[in-house]
Every structure is written in C-alpha cells, then in structure tokens.
Amino acid sequence: MHDSEDFYLRNITKVEGHANLSLKLRNKKVESCEFRITESQRFFEEIVEGRHFSQIPLIVARICGLCSSSHLITAIEAIERALDFSPSEQTLLLRELATNAEFLKSHSLHLYMLALPDYLNKESVLRFEEKEHHFIHDGLELKKAGTDVLIALGGRPHQTVNLRVGGFTRFPPQEKIDAVRKTLEQAREKAIDAIKLFSGFAKKNTFARKTNYVALVGSGYCLLCGAIKCTDGTIVDEEHYLDHLHEFLVPYSTAKQDKFNGEEYMVGALARMNLNKKEMYPSVKKLIKENKLKFPNQSPFYNNVSQALELLQCIEHSLKIIDELHVRKEPIPKIKPRESEGIGVTEAPRGVLYHSYKLNSRGFIESGNIVVPTLQNCRNIEGDLKQFVPTLLSKPREKAEYEIEKLIRAYDPCISCSTHFLKVRWT
Amino acid sequence: MRKKLRVGFFSLSCCEGCSLVFFDLEENMLKALDFIEIVDARLFDGNHPEERLDLAIIEGGIQNERDKDDLVAVRKRSDYLIGFGACATVAGVPGMRNALPQQMQKSLQKKAIKPIKEKVYPINAFVKVDYLLQGCPVFTHELLDVLVKLYHGTKPKLEEVPVCKECIERENPCLLFQRIPCLGPVSYGGCKALCPTERGQCIACRGITKDGNFEALRELFRKMGVSEQEIHNLFTYFTANPFEKKEGE
C-alpha cells in the first residue's frame, strides 16, 4: 500500500454488533483513527428506572447475547449489596460455576467461530474445507461443555431463568451436575488443543504496544469479586471505581469511551493474564511454559491465546466447584427493601463489568449505571491501530485491511453491549 | 437433490443473541449446512448485499431510519422473511422504552446520540413478514424446524398455544396459586413453559395472545396484593409494544 491511504471498513464482520472503522494514513503516519460504533442506543439505564429490583437482572441480561449471565450476575450482586444481603455459600458457588461456564461458551464461540478464520486465511468458518472441519467440532465440543452447565443451572444456555436476587428459583438435581462433570472432563483435552493452536498463531504476530491493563485481583483467579487493579500500580475498591474511570463521548460513535486514571487501557483475557497469571491452576501454568508463552505480554493478538488458556482454567475450576457441591434446596429468602445503593463489579468474558443501582425505600430503581468491557477497550483499539497500520506498509492494501480487521477481532468486541446507555453517571 | 436454501441472517437493533443460537445447533449446524447455504451474514461470514435470498432471517427491532432501510432492502431481495426473536417480533426488551412516561420518551429522543424513532417497532410494522420465530432468545429446534420445512417447500405454521396449556402438560405447580404474578395465561407458548418449569414467572417474551384477558389478570394480580406500579411493569415487560402499528397509522 501507499504511504498515504484512506481506509473505511463498513460493517466489520464477525464481531457482535455494527461498527465501522475510518482511518487516514498520511506520510506513513496515522493522522486519524475512528472506531465508529453505529448501533442505536437501547437505553437500558432508563428502562430499569421505576422497576422493582427483582425484575432488573432479567432485563439487563438482555444487553448481551454472548454474556447474558455476566450481566445477570453482576446486576444481582449490585442489588444484593445495596440491600445488604449475603447469599448462601451454595448460591455463591453455583453463580461462580455459571460464570465459568459462560466464559467457556463465550470464549470457544469467539475463538473457533469468529477469530479462527482470520488465522487460517478463510473468510469464515462456513468456508472451512473438509480437512479443517475438526476445528469446528473442537470448538463446538468446548462450547457444549459451557452450555451444558448453564442448562443444568439456569434452564437454558442464554438468558438463564433460575438465577435471581437472593438465590435460585430451582436447583439442579445432583445427577444433572454429575452429567456435566463428564462433559467438562471430556472438554479438557480440547482446551489443551486450543492452547497449542492459538499459541502458534500468537507467536506469529510480533506487534506489541505498551498500554495499561485493568482486571480484578484477589485470592484465586477472580471472576466475581476482588479489587480493581491497573498495571499502572493503582488498586481500587469496587465502591470507588468512579473515582478512576472517566467516561466521555466521542463525536463519531454511539458508544462512549473510557479512560482509567486518564489513560487508555485494555480489559479482558489478556489483562487478566497479565495481572493474574500466578493464580491459575498448575495445569494451565504448565501449558504456558510448554508453549513458551510470555506474560505479561503487550501484543493484542495474545488476547486470543489468553482466552484459550482461560478455557482450561474455567474447566479446571468448574470441576473443582462441582467436587465441592452437594446441592440442597434453599428457598429464596424475603429481602426487605430500603433506600440504598449498591455496586457490582465482575469479570465478564470480555473484561471488567460494572453495574450500580440506586433503590428507593420500596425497592424500585431510582437510577442505574452500567459500564461494559467493550467500550473500555475502544480507545485502546484505536491506539493500537495508530501504531499497527504503519507496520503494514509493505503489504498490499487488501492484506492490510485484513490485518486491521484481525486486530479488532482479537479484542472480541461486543458492540451491541456498548451502546445501551445515554446518561452520564449519577452524582 | 433439491437446490440448497439460500439464507441470510441480519441484525437490526438487538443483542445478536438469537443469531448466535445458530451455533447452538452444534452438530446439527453442520447438518443444516448440507441443505442451506448462508449467502449473507455479517456475524458469521461477510456482507454480501448483492445476493438474492430464499430466506431472510431478521433479528432485532427498528430503532432508527437505518434499521428500517436495511429491513426494506432485505425484504426486496428475499422470497421469504421471518422475524427472529422477541426484538423483531414484539419489539422485545428495547421496546420497553415505549412504556416510559411520554415526557421521558421525548427527552430520550432529543438526547440520543444518533437520531432514533419515536418508538421501537417490531419488523412487521414496516414490511410483510412471512413467519415469526418467537422467544428471547429463540429455540434451536424451532430454527431447525423452519429451515427443514422451507427446504422441502412446505410452509411453517404458527401454533397459537398459551403458556398455561404447556405448563399444565408439564405438571408444574401453578405459580399464580403461590401468589407469584405470572403472565402465562395471556402469553404465547411454544417454549414448553420453560420459565414456569424453572419456577420463574412467565414474562411473555413470545408475545401476547390475541384473546388474552388482560383485565381479568390485572384484577387477579390486585387481589394477590401486587401494587399498581408492579402490575404496570409486568404488563410492559416484553409486551410494551404488542399491538403497535406502522408509524403514523
């Protein structure tokens, strides 16, 4: 391609939601880069106003088709905190299991169905040749391990029914739990294959750029609790996230963008690996070593192999939880509403997810604030592209476009998630 | 052998969870690809707006002009078109915006970053829709059923069964008897009463039956001690827009 080029990628494919990219290259330098999210806002923060707290999780779960359980559980956590309610140990374990299953489902879908074609030079998974079909089977088997757990716990793989504020409407019988243990054990081998496969791809991409990473840290590989840690050294309590997150509008996108302590940053699998690798299961660490993967790592393409490593992490952890479980029935206790506010912060498959709600004395929502992972990553995607595109000068234009899309997809962006809101936070 | 069914998947304003259900077909997905060819799908493959379609599968509701234009353009190039999931068929959760107080709706319209329509519409407000696949999200077996039928040249037929009928068939304890406000009596089934089976109330994600007696149910909820605000909220869950007609009609 030439030293000066205009790129306009419309309706970027194989990402969830509608986004365009406009990038101007002038004399080998990126003059402007706009990652334009074009979906209309769906106003979830307004929709929840005036509704009873018990309804909220099921509504906000509809923000996302890929990580509905993450939104569901984060909203439940926020509301329970507001009402000063501590769920039972069993409920917490089952929620953790659901979250791990959600990661399995979401990561395997992204890796095999959306990202893999990039690395095999195929337009999509639908155009794989017969000899590549085994990848599809592997991806589907990993996904099935996740969806089977979610079906057992929540009635169906997406938009689960049973998880509520206070506990579960219905508990899975022990034999269902035992059945999913088997599927998980079978998927373990496939996860190891995934790590090998995506390690190879990761090492082929040499592009790296210094940026900040943000993830939850605490004891273990935290997904549902912990403090918010940034690689700039800051550690923040969940309650004080608004002191560090700065949301702002950009004129070209329907989604806001975010900075952490005034800097762009990345959330998601790579951020978690960079901050939490030491907390992973020994079997995962062994594979990091065997495949000669280096963390912390500053290549955005490493996000995919990080997701693959998390597949195994989530399988191991799910099996551990299942070993501890002896499911017994626990009715959902009556929770007394009061004027209050609460914050829930978790790791969704794509990164740190924040939900906070203000309740009135009768338990109806006064206001809500939701910060999703993808909009936190938008700024960083642009930052990467500014440095990445000038490295592609020797390539033909078509190939350069391909590489640009590949980088965007490596982030696993979930665009419809990021356009649900309008309001700048409450004060 | 018959010619493969040429299929396109399209998303308007939604979460794209229904399209992803295609991957939930799992091994059946590969079998389906033996008799369907996906010729235009941004999410799974690529944008191919020049392709003619035997079947267009549309998820998402209409929030803005572009949604509407995209929908109309797809209708023109496809023989058969189905609404896929609650957002497309009943305006879904985004349609809850339609139930907000008038003033708030107006202010949202003003504040929206990109111009939005006054209401959120299901797709049949703007084009002829041949079939509705209901649910939030849709079920894999229903998707497969439609694909197989259309491939063989038969037309799928919408079965209008209320949730209560399927709930009774599954021998579930009635949630209304336990004083849990459930929309089962006025909602379309086909879901095999999934939510009540899991002991969660029906939230009418598959739409409201034509002869659903709202008033009787409202009265029952009142007797159960459900507050007016909560009754309003329940009736505007997925059902904020059940009878919405074309703009300006």
Image (tube, grey):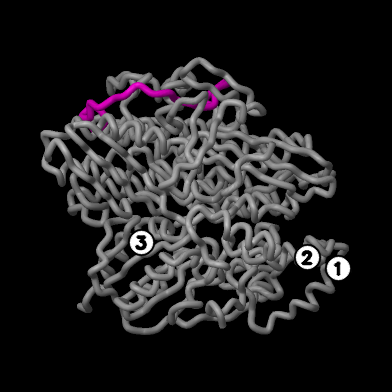
Callout 3–callout 2 Cβ contact below 8 Å: no
Q: Are marks 1 and 2 on the same chain?
A: yes
Q: Position of residue B186 (x, y in %)?
A: 69, 75
Q: How many marks?
A: 3
Apparent side of residue A272 relative to residue A357 in the rendered image (left or right) = left
Q: Quadrant of residue B221?
A: bottom right
Q: Nearer the viewer, mark 3 or mark 1?
A: 1
Callout 3–callout 1 Cβ contact below 8 Å: no
Callout 1–callout 2 Cβ contact below 8 Å: yes
Residue A151: within the magenta? Answer: no
* Residue matched to label 3: B28
Q: Position of residue A125 (x, y in %)?
A: 27, 52
Quadrant housing the N terminus of chain B? bottom left
- In this view, A130 is above or below B176: above
* Residue matched to label 1: B222
Residue pictured at 55% horizontal, 79% vertical: B248
* Residue matched to label 2: B231
Which amino acid, mark 3?
A: Asn
Q: CA distance from mark 3 to mark 1?
A: 46 Å
What element does badge 3 sit on? helix
Q: Which residues are magenta?
A: A201-221
Residue A209: within the magenta? Answer: yes
Which amino acid, mark 2?
A: Ile
Q: Earlier in the sequence, mark 3 or mark 1?
A: 3
Outermost residue, top direction?
Answer: A233
- In this view, B10 is above or below B211: above
In the foreground, A34 or A51: A34
- Which chain is home to disc 3? B
